[in-house]
Amino acid sequence: MAVQLRQELIDEGHFIIDKEGDEKTSAGDAVSAGKEEIKLRDANLTAIAEDIEFEDALELRHQAARTTEEDHKINKAFLKHDLPELNLTADFIYEAIHKDNGRWLNQAKLFWHLEHRDALAHKDEKHWKSKLSQFSKGVTCLWDVKTDMPKIEAITNSGVLDWIKLDDLEAQYSSESLYGQEFLKKALASNKQIKIALGITVKDDSSPIKLAMRLLARLGFKLAYSKKNDSVKYYKLDAELVNDPDRQAVFDALNFKWQKEVVKIAETHYLSAKINGTGENNFLYKHEAQSREFKPEKLAENHVV
């Protein structure tokens, strides 16, 4: 309860000072500062690490004995493979990998895949085939299969994106509103799916705002405290997170990678169709990927939802 109350006060804009004794606080601050310094150092070493091919990084990663320098090379190669053409500065690498163990980057990727379901289906299919191939050789277990489609479907079916409009930074939301209650009702109808895919429990007495916050956090978004009228609290989308240029850089890199992948898929199907004599009607993909750039719209007037 204490942790929950503390977070609610922070969300409402209060400045919290933790007092647990000067000696204990100083020791804790020193440990935190040391950990942060290590993360910043590792981010810098990754940024200046030697470039190696992705295939070499895969092979190197399976070696039991690796040096720290080799780990930095591997991390850089994986980032370049996942986010082609993106400028991998030390600051970006810190945010993407070291700051929160990759959570921020995974959230950005999940949101991009929500907007690009065809790319998500393709990625999950490749993952399944890879794992099943290893499973047939006794190398992996089926619980190693981790796909993102169930997460996307759970978030979509929860109704949170029907209530919280990601392109409206001025809209204000409250748990007491009719739309908030409708969202909770819809989420309750998918409570099992949400629990299995996301580990989030939905109950009859769940707070619509708090539930929305937990679901949106999986996509890298946050509701920030806006104001309080009488006893009703209002929240708005955190504009700083929505307009984060690093997130947009991730989206641009993923768009670029998917466009190249679509061309590759189309060429593969074209060659297959010619070999099998089935003609061009077998095309499953177009040569041009449709990429939607996410740009929130800032409205002049306030909307309470």
Image (cartoon, rainbow, N blue to C red):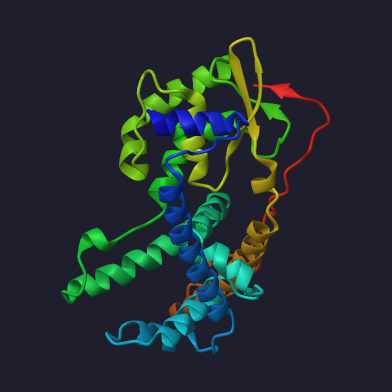
Front-lying residue, 257 or 279: 257
Q: Residue 20 occupies which quadrant of the picture?
A: top left
Q: Quadrant of the N terminus?
A: top left
Q: Tell me which residue sits at (43%, 60%) in the image.
A: 31
Picture coordinates of residue 133, whole percent (x, y):
26, 73
Please give the name of the residue rendered at 22% of the width and 61% of the height, measured from the top-left corner: 142
Q: Residue 180 appears in which quarter of the rendering? A: top right
The answer to whether any part of residue 274 appears in the image is no
Residue 282 at x, y percent in the picture: 51, 67
Asked whether 23 or 209 is in front, the reply is 23
The correct choice, above or below, for 241 with respect to 285 in the image is: above
For residue 215, above or below residue 227: below
Residue beneath the point at 55% across and 51% down: 111
Q: Position of residue 23 (x, y in %)?
A: 42, 50
Is residue 54 depicted above or below 222 in this figure? below
Residue extending farthest to the right is 300
